[in-house]
Amino acid sequence: MSDFIQIQYFCRMETIRQERINNLLQKDLGEIFQREMKHVSRTAMVTVTRVKVTPELSLARVYISLFATKDKNALMGEIRKHTKEIRGKLGNRIRHQLKSVPELNFYLDDSLDYIENIDNLLDR
């Protein structure tokens, strides 16, 4: 096997690993928000739409959609305040799959709001 093909294969393996970890974190974080973080979200519905981990698995960017809330920025602030608690709960769930729990950075995913706004404009 040539060096180029080996490098290409190795790079692809990294992305497959990252994709698996992204999916694992998305699933577990979604369950944490639905079942264990009701005191933060209250009546709002929190959906984890996407997770992207860095290649060294030290940082995870978590994209969240928020529904049934008037002030999304305030709720995002509450979620960010509880990052340490969320990370601890995630660590309890993934302790057998990963050596260390990545740092979590939360971002508001407003793509669904954008799509809804376009639909409303098209309906007019």
Image (cartoon, rainbow, N blue to C red):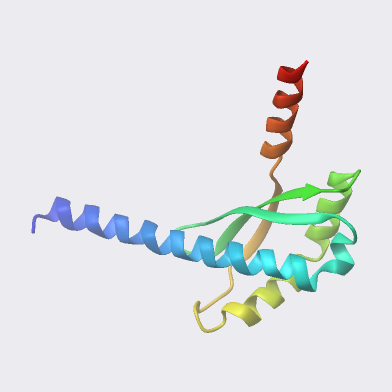
Residue under the point 71% across and 18% down = 122
| Vertical relation: 71 (above or below) 90 | above
Task: Inspect this view and state whether residue 60 appears.
Answer: yes
Residue under the point 81% across and 69% down = 37
Q: Residue 67, image x and y in percent?
A: 81, 48
Task: Inspect this view and state whether residue 84 appears.
Answer: no
Q: Nearer the viewer, residue 102 or 44?
A: 44
Tag count = 0
| Vertical relation: 25 (above or below) 45 | below
Residue 112 vs residue 5: left or right? right
Q: Residue 26, image x and y in percent?
A: 60, 62
Residue 2 vs residue 96: left or right? left
Residue under the point 31% across and 61% down = 13
For the C terminus, the quadrant is top right
Q: Residue 112, image x and y in percent?
A: 69, 38
Residue under the point 80% across and 55% down = 45
For the N terminus, the quadrant is bottom left
Q: Residue 69, image x and y in percent?
A: 88, 48
Question: Can you name the residue that lies furthest to the top here?
Answer: 124
Res 28 → quadrant: bottom right
